[in-house]
Image: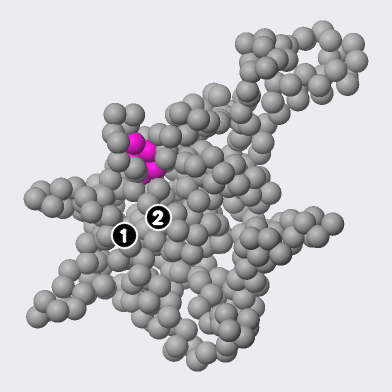
Amino acid sequence: MDRDEESLKRRIRRLKELEKNGLLRAVNGTLADVWREGSKPKTVRLRHSFVIRRPDVVEEPPATQLLNPRGVALRFYLLALFEAQCRLAPGAEWTGGDRPFRGRRGWNDFIAVDVAYSSTTDTYARAPERTQETKRIRQVKGALLTLEGLGEQALVEIPLKRGGKYRDHQAFRLMNETGRGAAALTPDYYIVPPVDKQMIEIPIDFLLQGWVQVLHPSEIFTWLSFRLLSAHFPARHRLSGNYLYAKKREHFHLLRDSWEDSCQTLVEFGLLRRMPTIAEAAAARATQGIFGSLFPQPGGLGGREDRYEPYRYQLTDKGLAADALETCMKELLIRLKRRGR
């Protein structure tokens, strides 16, 4: 069994466990309650600097430092923005409120992770609910430490408890999407974006239907990149789709393999649609006989047959309304079956 197949089986195993123990349904229910009892935003708004830097800035954007396949830091930060935008008005600075870490609607209830797997026995132990909750809290604390450990790009601040010996994770403070800034300056605490600023818009179903829980960090980041591209180039997105390649991809600090794998997975899950290339469109017209020949097009970009043409994609937001767990399980099992042929 090669590494790709092993990784695929591991992902399917984790999804099956989330389905079996009902944790993802419970987490989705918690997030839905938070949304209904808050301002019910249609989208969660994200500043562009979280996923892309200006060409003259060398450092990576914060999101690219949160792509550990097993990490939950990127997921938690997006969920913290969701919670803030449900609770606070546009223009308001972050306040932690009174949300606990443990218990119903605590921060541990925002994350769905399989925590009871034993690699020794290759089975899931039926640990007591209290033990599983403690492990989920540990995951959230680990995410906070990761978010705090980004230097000037730190996305949270965790104060010390009275006495100065232990961290007060429950009192964490959220930073703006660019990070806290230089240590000598006042921390750039998170402020809910005003409604008149252009932002990356994350449809609420991405969070309420469980997509933020089941996608890998690299897939979330790729999807966010397309949301930024579609916002900046809406006509191109609508007509032919958006794309990134070579130097353009470097602005997002995306590796080619990770980008291509994520695009393919998002297509399978129904969140992206791959648009026909010029050559594919020309071939399709050729099969239409005389009607296709009425509207001839060059076979490649600029009329050159040897020019590289990148794949272009459109966002398909209707796919977000589907149950994320059910969709991912179905498509990953189909992929596994194809590999077994």
Q: Residue under circle 1?
A: 147
The total of numbered circles placed on residues is: 2
Instruction: Give x and y (percent) for residue 323.
Output: 63, 60
Name the secondary structure under disc 2: loop
Quarter of the image with the C terminus in it: bottom right
Q: Image height check: is 194 above or below 329? A: above
Q: Nearer the viewer, residue 331 or 309?
A: 309
Instruction: Give x and y (percent) for residue 229.
Output: 48, 33
Q: Are marks 2 and 1 in contact (CB under 8 Å)?
A: yes
Query: Does residue 215 belong to the magenta stretch?
Result: no
Amino acid of disc 2: Leu
Distance from the alpha carbon under mark 2 to that under mark 1: 8 Å
Q: Earlier in the sequence, mark 2 or mark 1?
A: 2
Q: Image height check: is 15 above or below 277? A: below
Q: In the drawing, does residue 101 fall left or right of residue 313?
A: left
Q: Nearer the viewer, residue 291 or 274?
A: 274
Q: In the drawing, does residue 36 fall left or right of residue 329?
A: left
Q: Quadrant of residue 121?
A: bottom right
Residue at horizontal 37 percent and vertical 52 percent from the top: 65
Would you say residue 157 is visible in this rendering? Answer: yes
Residue at horizontal 68 percent and vertical 49 percent from the top: 268
Residue at horizontal 44 percent and vertical 43 percent from the top: 201
Name the mark on residue 118.
none
The residues colored magenta run 47-53
